[in-house]
Image: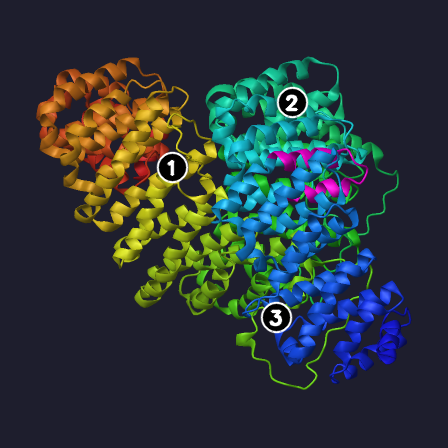
Amino acid sequence: MEQMTQIITNLLSSDNDTIKKATADLQEAYKHPETIPALCEIAVSAPEPQVRQYSAVLLKKHLAKLRQWNKVPVEQQQAIKQGMLNALMQEQQKSVRKAIAQFVGVLVRHEAKKADSWMNEVLKFIYSYCSSSDPKQSELGSSTFAILADAAPDQFLQHMESVCEMFTAALVATEATGNMATPVIFNILTGMTYLVPFTLGHNTAEQTLQKSIPLIVKSLQAFAVQPEVDQFVHAFDILESMADLNAKLLNNHIKMLLEFCLEAASNTQLDSAVRIKAVAYVGWLVRLKKKLIIKQKLIEPIIRVVFNLMATEPDDEDDDEEYFLAEDNSNPMTTATQTMDLLALSVPPEKLIPPLLQLLEPALQGQDPLPRRAAYLSMAVIAEGCSEAICNKYLETMLNIVKVGITDPIPLVRNAAFFALGQFSEHLQPDITKFAPQILPILFEFLHQLCNELRVSWPNEVVVTEPWPPKTDTILYINQLQIKRKSVLTNYSGGTEPKHIDRMFYALETFCENLEDELVPHLPVLMEILFEALSPNNSVRVRELALSAISAAANATNENMLPYFQRLITILQSYLAPTENEDIISLRPQAIDTLAALARTIGKQNFMPLATDTMTFALNLLENAEDPDVRRALYNLIASLAEVVNEEMASVFPKVIERMFDSILSTEEVVPEFKDDDGVPAPADEADENGEDIDIEHSDDEDDDLDNIAGYSVENSYLDEKEEAILALKEFAEHTGTAFIPYLEKSYQNVYKMIDHPQEDIRKVSIDALSSFVVALFKQQDVQGVANAITILIPKLGQIVHDDEEVSVVLSALEGLGDLLKELKQVALPTVELRDVIFACITDVLHGKVACQFDESNGDDDEDAEESEYDEAIVEGAGNMLPLLGGAMGPDEFRPYFERTFPIILQKLQKARKNEDLDTQRAFAYGALAECFEPLQNHTGIFFHAFCPVLIDGLSDEFDQARQNAVYGLGELVLYSGDKSFEAYPHILNALSQAVSKETKPSALDNICGAIARLIIVNSTLVPLAQVLPVFIQHLPLREDFDENASIFKCLKQLYLQARDAIAGSLEQIIAIAIHVLYKKEYTEKETYDTALGLLQEIRENYPDKFSAVANSNPEIIAFLQTL
């Protein structure tokens, strides 16, 4: 024993040599059977607390593996168990007691399967001590409970009812004392947090725990005002655990929980950590229980509190410009901003926007800049979740407010307004583009001012260490260059320049990227400013933002960037050439991204001369790239080149594919954080002392290293690298044809391993890539490869739809299934089982039964409840899959599936008709039905009498998108019902006549024309052409929905062949319409082009004078017609 005590003392030494020798001595000692009893004796009797503690730690570490415990003789095992339990009762030092309790947790797990379960004895000790009137005993019992619940929570499974009763009894007893912020309560809350997931299915335990929630809240109120704020933070975990793992426990107490959180969040006397926890939990509850919260009219109080918190000053002045911070660095303002974002994603817009606008008006008119900033931040963060509602009702009003904000004299207000403009540009497409003439001049003026400010700050004598611009004309090679960067600025976080530049560039970039061709007239001004911003006299941050903005401009305008291409290449070379200049090196990833954007957009023929040199540069740099951000950018560049050189990538793949696989399979993005053993150094890992082989198959629960992990942190740069590697493989599959086939199987296998990654963006890109891999196999006619892949992938995507809680991931899974159905058709459905997997996804989403919809049904009638736009997006995604499923099946097989589905859609339509705010739901229902008639083909007639009145009613809907979808559906219904529709022609034509006389929206008018065309195609003899055609032709050419030109020209061609007399007087108009559509390329299918062109040619042959009268009216048209 003295020898073991000395070894432990030496292990605790600060001298490395002493520790090294002691470690070797310890490994030798473990070979002798007397070592374990000696450590037990030291743990209970050594005079120094740290020696006792470390002895218990060594016991836990060594005996954590079941095979080591089994080597201990049975009589020694009994003595150890009894001795440790006695030590728990007698030990006075908390740190030692904690170490012993953790060791007891290990023993409990090992002994669980034995007939005379030791757990009963341990529980008897815990129950007895927790209920003791002696404070020391009750604290000992509760701390032991907390430690054991952490160490071996599964061992409490058979005892959940009694544990929950003990938990409630302790809360009740402590409440009677008037002080609930006691160590005992903290311990039992901590212990119960670990056990919440094990209450599932234990009805009595769930009921007991549910009834204790008011007492839990009381205890948290008590901890909130204590000076030790960490106790509140850790105790609060029990509510988070309930929300995350057994949310139904909260149902009866939502109002009380929200009132507690809102009160705590509003209380400026409380520590920021308390307020952060409270307002974050509000967002969590809204996401999980929005229907209950709306029903109890709690949304408005939530909005008020959250908005007021957004209008507070952060504790750290440096956080003024940070709107979203990681949890460890968050403050009440940033957390409230995130909660407002969650509100927008979860709550129906009409429940959120009107009460929020009531808060914005006084805030914007006041003198205090903080509420003004909060107003712009609120508009910014609701843009994603409420995009349709804002576009339909509030866009111009909100945009006018933002235009005022970006000229506000206070920087923090101005920056928030820029942020709002960026969010609008990102999420309110395409509606916001019509305001470009108002917005772009303001942004350009700010950029001009910025460049002027920066120019003034330049030193009089600037020494440019890099050639500017460089003289060479080709992409430079970089050989054996080791990338070492001090830091990479990857988010909009400000720098040494005016703080507003990050937000301003964000607004500029997002606005420009989404303008597409409408940006072209503004390119000269924009590029002049960006070229000036790229001057080497400017800071790294300004140049980085300018390069990113150039990428956005390239993505928007494509080959229209050609006038600037050579100059851009020359500038980019300066960032790609070998150098020791830290500024240049730090800008390299963004420069590579900009080069990739140009490769994708400038035109294949324009970039091809640079392709070989660019690829050589990328491969050479990748060979030694240690920075994950550089690797990410290079993957992006190489993928962009695949779009240029296509199958010529075959020679490149052997040099990059394995590196990409390494990035995908790497776990460097996840960094484990280990539990703190109260300052005791971690024991060295043990070798297996007898050199025995370990039976891995039967040692599943022996990974004691995992027991010591407290959590994980994430390195974003490695995550971004992983994401880009997956995207690159996806692009290879799409653009390189047979060259990628040898790598498809392994790519599929490696990416499939990422489909359950904890980070949602990785799950999304994995789904997208896997779908592309299968489509690539299909295009290469690999029948067996496709069969093998979809047998795995379709059930997996079905599982994701049902189980994943992230809406964006579920949408990706639905889109992935849709892509497979669209591309593979019947090949995607080789078995009834796969067909049923997809159908179950559709019906379960429509019923609101998948995990991300957070179904809250509890028997109450909530059929009139509104949905958030994200909820609607999921339903729409499932609805879009139904016609794709029909197209893959064939009409005969699809009909019974449609018969099971359309009542659900009609029920949704009926619900939406009762509430005028549910306009998008009505539009969805009409659209979903309309798209199913084509795959039903002649079976559509069976449903004609059921759907015709429904769709005619839709023609008078107040929402233009609903009217558009209804009239489109009416035309499709007639087209595929054939003679079943003939008797209804007068009624339908009358409805269309009334609709066209009232309609003002171009897209709806286009669809009315499409419906008339379909009626004529099906049976022109039932249409009074003399009355109908003048109105029909008057509304041509179409203005927005060019898909309908397919039906328009089929109709005109048919009339020309079968009823020429009826259109003889309108031939010149028809010629003009056809020329307009061909000249403007207002068609989406080659068949439409062929039909229109054929019609023109026939008219020219038969009516040359009429044709010449139209064709010769404009020199531009004459030139165009000569090209046909």
Disc 1, SS: helix
Residue 654 location (% of width, % of height): 53, 70
Q: Tag 3 or tag 2, which sits nearer the N-term?
A: 2
Residue placed most toward the observer, 692 or 580: 692
Disc 2, SS: helix
Residue 1112 location (% of width, % of height): 29, 26
In the picture of the structure, the residue carrying the numbered disc 2 is 375
Report the Cα–Cα distance between label 2 and label 1.
Answer: 31 Å
Report the Cα–Cα distance between label 2 and label 3.
Answer: 54 Å
Residue 100 location (% of width, % of height): 75, 63
State the predominant SS element of the stretch in magenta. Answer: helix
Residue 600 location (% of width, % of height): 52, 49
Q: Mark 2 is on which residue type?
A: Ala
Q: Mark 3 is on which residue type?
A: Glu
Residue at the image point whose x is 42% and y is 39% from the top: 874
What span is in magenta? 214-238
Report the Cα–Cα distance between label 1 and label 3.
Answer: 47 Å
Q: Is residue 940 magenta?
A: no
In the picture of the structure, the residue carrying the numbered disc 3 is 702
Q: Residues within 10 Å of mark 1 (few under 14, many from 20)?
A: many
In the picture of the structure, the residue carrying the numbered disc 1 is 876
